[in-house]
Image (cartoon, rainbow, N blue to C red):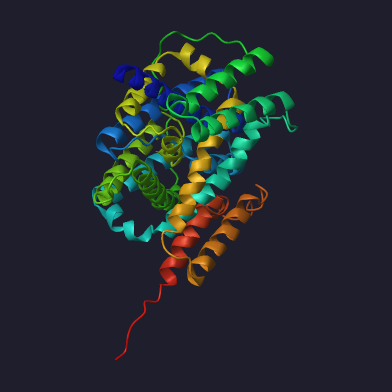
């Protein structure tokens, strides 16, 4: 019975890892006009680096079942630089060096234990705001995927949308109303039903390219990194903001699993150090930098899977899959509407964690004002046209075009400038 449970939990974690890894390479492939062969290579390297990063963090970093996956903040940077760079290949080479430099900053912040000293900055108000803005930022991406709005398609695909919402409600319904194994394996069951239904009704695309049965992930696939001094300030800011991601993910997961928070600073410190190494690995293998995904806590809450060993097994399987391009190509055929629907269901739990963190203490006028400003400016930035910052220097473009970065930065800044007044008695 124990073996069966571990096996099922491992495959459910593996599906979550795959669903969370597939979408971002497709987005980047479209932005940089990558060929089918290049996209398969990017997918292969993404699986490999996600597996390595998640395994290292589980064993010697956070020591928690937190997936390291393609970062939304880096997808924004990739997209902005693609629009402003002189050439797509040159931009990709610069991005490789930027991820390596960011990794160096994060490694230094972790190894010198500065990350631990920064922990008081990331209050429940900050982590709650981060969770909420993250759900707002990525919910649009997930919803577009569920509606079949991909690439040049700008109208809702009715059949794809119906299957996606059926998958969404199956995952959500089983996790909330079902009992026992039906609840525990809601994500697995939902994706499986959605994938089969999609294939039967709409069909699937066959493999149109020949790929070797075995190959090693290629390093510096876009060419050797090109270094530009302008990447240093962007890398430093990204590294600091990424620590808020580290803190938010550790806080959310420890809360969801029910662990004591006595060693939280140690987890943040070691996790930041390894995140630096993982950024360097992402730069080396020409993929999107990985960060801890706060949705991992949503997945744990959704399925009730709190053990770490199935997560470790799933990361090892993902690494093995990366060496077999035919498997990578097959997995890439998971319908985007189905994968996005499963991820959207996990985000429902993340919204709850955002509310829980923000209401740990009473929301007084000071906190309401800070949150209100951060939400309005952060979310407002997300809905601005992509080219609105084109006339500004590249560093300002990369910062101001990311609503998650702007909103989180604002709440940190306002909390530090507007200190909470403590009541004092005068005798």
Residue 188: x and y in percent read 48, 23
Examine the rendered structure and indicate whether residue 195 appears above or below residue 396. above
Residue 334: x and y in percent read 56, 20
Examine the rendered structure and indicate whether residue 421 appears above or below residue 311. below
Examine the rendered structure and indicate whether residue 204 appears above or below residue 149. above
Closer to the camera in the image, 358 or 95: 358
Residue 173: x and y in percent read 55, 32
Q: Say whether residue 351 is visible.
A: yes
Query: Which residue is farthest bottom?
Result: 427
Q: Pick the quarter of the image with the C terminus.
A: bottom left
Can you tell which quarter of the image residue 69 is in?
top left
Closer to the camera in the image, 262 or 387: 262
Residue 175: x and y in percent read 49, 33
Residue under the point 25% across and 36% down: 60
Please tell me how many numbered marks the rendered image carries: 0
Left or right placement of residue 413 versus residue 154 in this view: left
Q: Say whether residue 46 is visible.
A: no
Q: Pick the quarter of the image with the N terminus.
A: top left
Examine the rendered structure and indicate whether residue 171 appears above or below residue 126. above
Closer to the camera in the image, 395 or 129: 129
Residue under the point 38% across and 38% down: 279
Can you tell which quarter of the image residue 258 is in?
top left
Residue under the point 44% across and 66% down: 415
Left or right placement of residue 260 versus residue 409 in this view: left
Can you tell which quarter of the image residue 224 is in?
top left
């Amino acid at each position: 019975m124990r073996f069966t449970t571990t096996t099922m939990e491992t495959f459910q974690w593996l599906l979550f890892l795959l669903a969370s890894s597939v979408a971002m390479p497709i987005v980047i492939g479209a932005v940089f006009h990558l060929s089918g062969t290049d996209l398969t290579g990017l997918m292969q390297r993404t699986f490999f680096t996600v597996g390595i990063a998640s395994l290292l963090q589980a064993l010697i970093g956070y020591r928690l079942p937190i997936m390291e996956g393609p970062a939304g903040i880096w997808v924004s940077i990739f997209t902005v630089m693609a629009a402003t760079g002189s050439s797509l290949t040159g931009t990709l080479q610069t991005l490789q060096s930027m991820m390596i430099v960011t990794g160096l900053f994060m490694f230094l912040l972790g190894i010198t234990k500065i990350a631990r000293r920064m922990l008081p900055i990331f209050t429940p108000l900050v982590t709650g705001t981060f969770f909420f803005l993250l759900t707002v930022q990525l919910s649009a991406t997930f919803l577009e995927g569920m509606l079949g709005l991909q690439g040049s398609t700008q109208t809702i695909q009715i059949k794809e949308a119906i299957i996606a919402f059926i998958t969404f409600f199956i995952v959500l319904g089983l996790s909330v109303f079902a009992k026992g194994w039906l609840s525990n394996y809601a994500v697995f069951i939902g994706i499986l039903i959605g994938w089969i239904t999609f294939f039967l009704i709409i069909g699937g695309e066959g493999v149109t390219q020949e790929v070797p049965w075995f190959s090693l992930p290629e390093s510096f696939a876009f060419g050797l990194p090109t270094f530009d001094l302008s990447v240093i300030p962007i890398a430093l800011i990204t590294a600091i903001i990424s620590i808020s991601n580290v803190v938010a993910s550790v806080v959310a997961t420890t809360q969801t699993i029910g662990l004591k928070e006595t060693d939280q600073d140690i987890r943040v410190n070691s996790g930041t150090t390894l995140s630096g190494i993982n950024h360097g690995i992402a730069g080396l293998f020409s993929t999107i930098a990985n960060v801890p995904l706060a949705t991992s806590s949503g997945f744990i809450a959704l399925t009730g899977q709190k053990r770490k060993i199935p997560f470790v097994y799933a990361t090892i399987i993902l690494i093995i899959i990366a060496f077999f391009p035919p498997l990578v190509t097959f997995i890439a055929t998971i319908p985007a509407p189905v994968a996005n629907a499963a991820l959207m269901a996990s985000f429902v739990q993340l919204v709850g964690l955002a509310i829980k963190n923000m209401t740990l203490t009473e929301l007084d006028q000071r906190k309401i004002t800070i949150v209100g400003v951060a939400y309005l400016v952060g979310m407002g930035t997300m809905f601005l046209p992509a080219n609105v910052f084109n006339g500004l220097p590249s560093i300002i473009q990369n910062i101001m075009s990311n609503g998650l970065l702007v909103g989180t930065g604002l709440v940190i800044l306002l909390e530090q400038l507007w200190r909470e007044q403590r009541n004092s008695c005068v005798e």
